[in-house]
Image: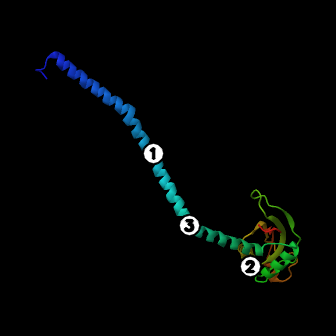
Amino acid sequence: MKNLPKEKRNHIILAAMVAGMALAVVWFLLISPQRHALADKRSKLSAAQEALTKAERLAGRGHEIEAEVERFTAQLHAIEQQMANGDLYSWIIRTMTAFQGNHQVTMPNYNPPSVGPLDIFPDFPYESATYAFRGYGHFHDVGKFIADLENRFPFASIRNLELDASGISTATSGDDAEKIGFRFDFVTLVKPSSPL
């Protein structure tokens, strides 16, 4: 380059600079936006492939999900068969007489229920019936009775439990004096008259 005349050398340098600027313009105006667009399309393609894989996996589980829905529906119907329905007073007498037979507690009488809406969730299809119970028994028997009662009826709960350790007020024998009194509210769901 030293042997070239100054004018020729300036033309070569100028041509090299113009070519470099042309390459820079092509890079920034054509190639760089295309690379960014290609990267965006690759990320969108990756997200679409991931969504497709997830959809295929769920579609493959369709029969399994249907089987689960049928199983849960059968469980719900089995539980609803045990729920209070019809004449709620006779239902509690029948149910508690049968249940109490396996336990050493005494509940001398049953009161009619108070029935009302249950505002747990919006559009909840069940109402609630609340029964007030009083009785007496030995401490362990009362505890076992209450635990079995809540375990046996998953759609019911015991509220406002009170134990009275003073014994039975009319106790004459030593065995009755060792018993405790109890009082609680038994809140149960009432099966709707129309199917869900």
In this picture, is 107 found above or below 116? below
Q: State which quadrant residue 26 falls in.
A: top left
Q: Residue 157 in the image: x percent, y percent?
A: 75, 68
Q: Which color scheme does this rendered protein use?
A: rainbow
Q: Quadrant of the N terminus?
A: top left
User: What amino acid is found at the position of numbered circle 1 in the picture?
Assistant: Lys
- What secondary structure is found at the residue carrying circle 2? helix
Distance of mark 3 from mark 2, alpha carbons? Answer: 48 Å
Q: Residue at x 62, y 71 (%)?
A: 67
Compared across the picture, whether 26 is left or right of 142 comes to left
Q: State which quadrant residue 19 falls in.
A: top left
Q: Which residue is mark 2?
A: 141
Q: Residue at x 46, y 50 (%)?
A: 45
Distance of mark 1 from mark 2, alpha carbons? Answer: 71 Å
Q: Residue at x 74, y 58 (%)?
A: 121
Q: Which residue is mark 3?
A: 61
Q: Nearer the viewer, residue 185 or 16?
A: 16
Q: State which quadrant residue 22 falls in.
A: top left
The crowding category of the residue bearing disc 2, from other C-alpha atoms within 10 Å (few below 14, some 14 to 19, many at least 20), is: some
Q: Nearer the viewer, mark 3 or mark 1?
A: 1
User: What amino acid is found at the position of numbered circle 3 in the picture?
Assistant: Arg
Q: Quadrant of the C terminus?
A: bottom right
User: What amino acid is found at the position of numbered circle 2 in the picture?
Assistant: Asp
Q: Which residue is mark 1?
A: 41
Q: Nearer the viewer, residue 62 or 17?
A: 17
Q: Nearer the viewer, residue 12 or 169?
A: 12
Dot placed on the residue nearer the N-terminal end, 1 or 2: 1
Dot placed on the residue nearer the N-terminal end, 3 or 2: 3
- Which residue of the protein is positioned furthest toward the left in this rendering? 3
Q: Nearer the viewer, residue 14 or 98?
A: 14
- What secondary structure is found at the residue carrying circle 3? loop
